[in-house]
Amino acid sequence: MISTVDPDARHTRKSPEARRDGYRAHVAAEPQTGIITDEQITRAAGEEHSDAAVAGQMMAREAEPAEVYGDSACGTGDLRAALAEGGHTAVIKPKPLKPAVDGGFTLDDFTASEQAGTVTCPDGVTRRITARRNVTFGAACRTCPLRARCTTNKTGRALILHEHDALLRAARRDWRASPALQENYSKYRPNVERAVAQAATWRGRRLKLRYRGTTRNNAWLKRRTAALNLRNLIGRGLAPRDGPGCRRPPDRWLPRPSSRSPAPGPARRPPAAGHTADPDASQANRSQPRREPDRQITSLRTGLFQHAPSR
């Protein structure tokens, strides 16, 4: 706890230099239109409030299978297993593996067999996986010719395998072997940054929360994302329609005409054959999102909010 007046606020950081006190906002958006489909504010620290944990909760609320895009913070084995169980397709950048020795062997250089319950090192030595998912090579490393590229530990190389190690290995293998996967990631993943910027900033400055506690701040975030979605839809051509159950808004709600008169210009030419002269139809055609109708795409992202100042 960092505040006596806001007990839900927590310390967090985006990097060793960028530290903040406050909350973490999680956003899911459709990357081709920018429509925010889910949002949630949590405490800024804690394993249960991590990007991957909240992303799993969001995708559990999805009614249909979707392609899920996320950065490496969402690339945990637990989230990948949850997405696979829910019928979703994970397009998530894997976390890079760090070798124990610079330029040496990584975890992918060891061959793991879940069926046999064994792991084989690059030198061909095989050891069993313990009940705690540990693998110890021990004395076999003393005379190994590849030891300099494997470990500097006096007791030999030791591994700790994740519960979903097979899923993580498959994700790293598919990422390296599929340029199309990386291309789709670069195409759709960055688009959610705009939705996060709209929700977390105002006129170039990061917003500070006005309320205390996750409940009130989460309600504020939902109202803000609803307003942002409405503005997005209006920009894409959403307009009131007359009909049963519909009512046009009063004139005072409609945008006022500009006081500037348009500059005189040449008369408009009649439309050519095959072109429409209806500006509403033309605007509707331009506002149609370009997407494949047989799949749903969701992109995940997290932003940080500073907590309300003490009064």
Image (cartoon, rainbow, N blue to C red):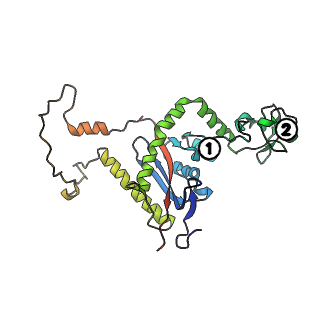
Give the image location of residue 276, x and y in percent: 21, 32
Mark 2 surroundings: few (<14), some (14-19) or many (≥20) residues within 10 A: many
Q: Is residue 130 above or below residue 20?
A: above
Q: Where is mark 1, residue-wise?
A: 81
Per the image, the residue denoted by label 2 is 141
Percent position of residue 3, x then y: 55, 70
Q: Tell me the element at label 1.
A: helix
Viewer-closest of 189 and 152: 152
Q: Secondary structure at mark 2?
A: helix
Q: Which mark is residue 310?
A: none
Give x and y (percent) for residue 294: 44, 35
State yes or no: discs 2 and 1 in contact (Cβ < 8 Å).
no
The amino acid type, in three-letter code, at marker 2 is Cys
Left or right for 68, reference 161: left
The image quadrant of residue 127 is top right
Camera-side residue of 3 and 131: 3
- Is residue 119 visible in the rendered structure shown here? no
Eye-nearest disc, 2 or 1: 2
Decide which of tag 2 and tag 1 comes sooner along the chain.
Answer: 1
Q: Residue at x 60, y 46 (%)?
A: 79
Q: Name the side, left or right, on which 208 lies relative to 101.
A: left
* Residue placed most toward the observer, 203 or 172: 203
Q: Amino acid at mark 1?
A: Ala
